[in-house]
Image (cartoon, rainbow, N blue to C red):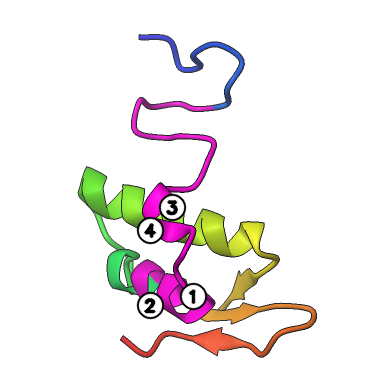
């Protein structure tokens, strides 16, 4: 299977260039909690495909909204910093 399909920069069939439809209505804090729930907290040898998908979709949605992650805290130029509550 080729690494890139068509003109999209996806390297797997699960990867998409848009956010999940269920995440568009989520608050920023809900996305941070979702990301933290699925992302590893330490060095992990193996993550499930589902964990990777949910963590990356939440991170993409946050970055699309202007956040950047730094040491577990999501920072924004005009909004308060967010940290997981889950």
Mark 4 in CB contact with mark 3 (< 8 angstroms):
yes
When the figure is inspected, residue 22 is found, relative to residue 31, above or below; the finding is above
Mark 1 in CB contact with mark 3 (< 8 angstroms):
no
Near mark 3 (Cα within 10 A), the count class, few <14, some 14-19 or many ≥20, is many
Residue drawn 42% across the image and 48% down it: 20
Badge 2 is on which residue?
33
Lower position in the chain sequence, tag 4 or tag 1: 1
Report x, y in % for residue 28.
Answer: 52, 75
Which one is in front, 59 or 24?
Answer: 24
Q: Secondary structure at mark 4?
A: helix
Residue 16 lies in magenta, yes or no? yes
Residue drawn 54% across the image and 35% down it: 17
**In this picture, residue 27 sits left or right of residue 75:** left
Q: Secondary structure at mark 1?
A: loop
Lower position in the chain sequence, tag 4 or tag 2: 2
| Residues shaded magenta | 10-35
Q: Nearer the viewer, mark 1 or mark 3?
A: 1
Badge 1 is on which residue?
27
Badge 3 is on which residue?
57
Badge 4 is on which residue?
55
* Cα distance in 3D space between marks 4 and 1: 15 Å
* Cα distance in 3D space between marks 4 and 3: 6 Å
* Cα distance in 3D space between marks 1 and 2: 10 Å
User: Which corner quadrant holds the C terminus?
Assistant: bottom left
Report x, y in % for residue 51.
Answer: 26, 54
Q: Secondary structure at mark 2?
A: helix
Report x, y in % for residue 84.
Answer: 42, 85
Residue drawn 42% across the image and 49% down it: 21
* Cα distance in 3D space between marks 4 and 2: 10 Å
As drawn, the label of residue 6 is none
């Amino acid at each position: 299977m080729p690494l890139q399909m068509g003109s999209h920069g996806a390297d797997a069939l699960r990867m998409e260039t848009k956010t999940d439809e269920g995440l568009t209505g989520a608050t920023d804090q809900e996305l941070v909690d979702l990301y933290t729930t699925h992302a590893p907290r330490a060095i992990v040898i193996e993550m499930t495909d589902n964990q990777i998908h949910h963590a990356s979709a939440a991170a993409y949605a946050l970055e699309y909204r202007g956040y950047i992650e730094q040491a577990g805290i999501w920072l924004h130029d005009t909004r308060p910093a967010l940290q997981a509550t889950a």
